[in-house]
Amino acid sequence: MAHQVTIQNSGHSFSVEDSESILEAALRQGIILPYGCRNGACGSCMGTVTAGSVDYPGGAPDALSDTDAAQHKALFCQAHPACDLTIQVREVDAAKDIEVRTLPCRVNKLEHLAHDVIRIYLKLPDTERLQFLAGQYIDVLLKDHAPRAFSIANAPHDDNFIELHIRNVSGGYFSAQVFNQMQEKAMLRFKGPLGTFFLREDTERPAILIGGGTGFAPLKGILEYAFHAGVEKPLHLFWGVRAKRDLYLEELPARWLQDHPNFSYTPVLSEPMPEDDWSGATGYVSDTVIRDYPDLSGHDVYMSGPPIMVEAGHKLFMQHGLDESRFFSDAFEYAALSEKND
């Protein structure tokens, strides 16, 4: 039995079949709601149920706290309506006209960026281009295995290739292939673009961009787009890694600092090695953000990296005045069946 869901903010309405989540049904009918991981780990799809109730067939997702549930909040990537619903959630207008496609591609180049990071350049057929928003991701389709999701690291204006940053994860099925077997000219298939992690251009609020490890990848695309488009609002990148060797493309932020007066950059090492001779910021990247911006009420925050980092940052930033509607995230789920950005 299908249930009707109405979005209170806009009045838009759509039907949800028994077998699909609220997010799946909305996307199927051309209504773009925010989402990141689509597995309940990041909280990007959270909204409020103002009338009716929802069920979670797979159990309550990790990112939904008891406090959230008590306030009638729901994670729409996992929630199924138990009856007709009215919900409050922001809609994403900028992505609604972008077609999600399944395309073949060829590995044009493999480039080692660090001891555990490889950059792949994917070449589409000459007659094809992928329309996407900077910061979105693709699902690499694998035979007899679940898709692997990777953020697009280049900006849409520079689309001769699709650039991915892949970290070598212990036990990772696809990353093991990339590091040990993959050759240039190998053929792959992917589905995309996906996700609602992209720069919001409807505001002049300063933007704080926070990446953990290869969470730098979508932020690189967003920043390259912003510089190309002439975005003038302040843009501050925080990049959290373990040691200096993990800052695998640090020459890029250094060049951006020289070329763009509205750009700031703070690398943060959580476990600097003695040979790093590091005098910069250390510890958790979210704590460094708060030291620089104790009041976030006037900012937008974009955060990309492991779910535990994103979840902790989200809670901390809310405590320091950030408007929840101005927090945008892309959580990488490191699991046997989901190697987001490996």
Image (cartoon, rainbow, N blue to C red):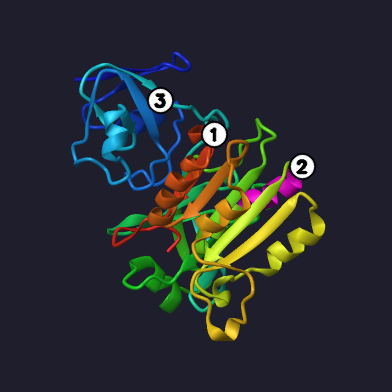
Taking depth in this image into account, of 282 and 127 the one nearest to the observer is 282
- Estimate the x, y position of residue 16 in percent, counting from the top left: 29, 24
Q: Taking 105 as reference, is 325 above or below it?
A: above
- Estimate the x, y position of residue 340 in percent, counting from the top left: 41, 57
Q: At numbered mark 2, what does the secondary structure look like: helix, strand or loop?
A: loop
The residue labelled by disc 2 is 232
The residue labelled by disc 1 is 95
Quarter of the image for residue 70 reads top left
- Cα distance, mark 2 to mark 3? 35 Å
Mark 2 residue crowding within 10 angstroms, few (<14) / some (14–19) / many (20+):
some
Which range is magenta? 220-230
Q: Is residue 102 visible?
A: no
- Estimate the x, y position of residue 239 in percent, counting from the top left: 57, 61
The residue labelled by disc 3 is 29
Q: Earlier in the sequence, mark 1 or mark 3?
A: 3
The residue located at (36%, 26%) in the rendering is: 48
- Cα distance, mark 1 to mark 2? 22 Å
Q: Taking 234 as reference, is 81 above or below it?
A: above
Mark 1 residue crowding within 10 angstroms, few (<14) / some (14–19) / many (20+):
many
Q: Taking 262 as reference, is 196 above or below it?
A: above
Side of 165 where 149 appears, left or right: left
Q: Identify the amino acid type marked 3.
A: Gln
Q: Identify the amino acid type marked 2.
A: Glu
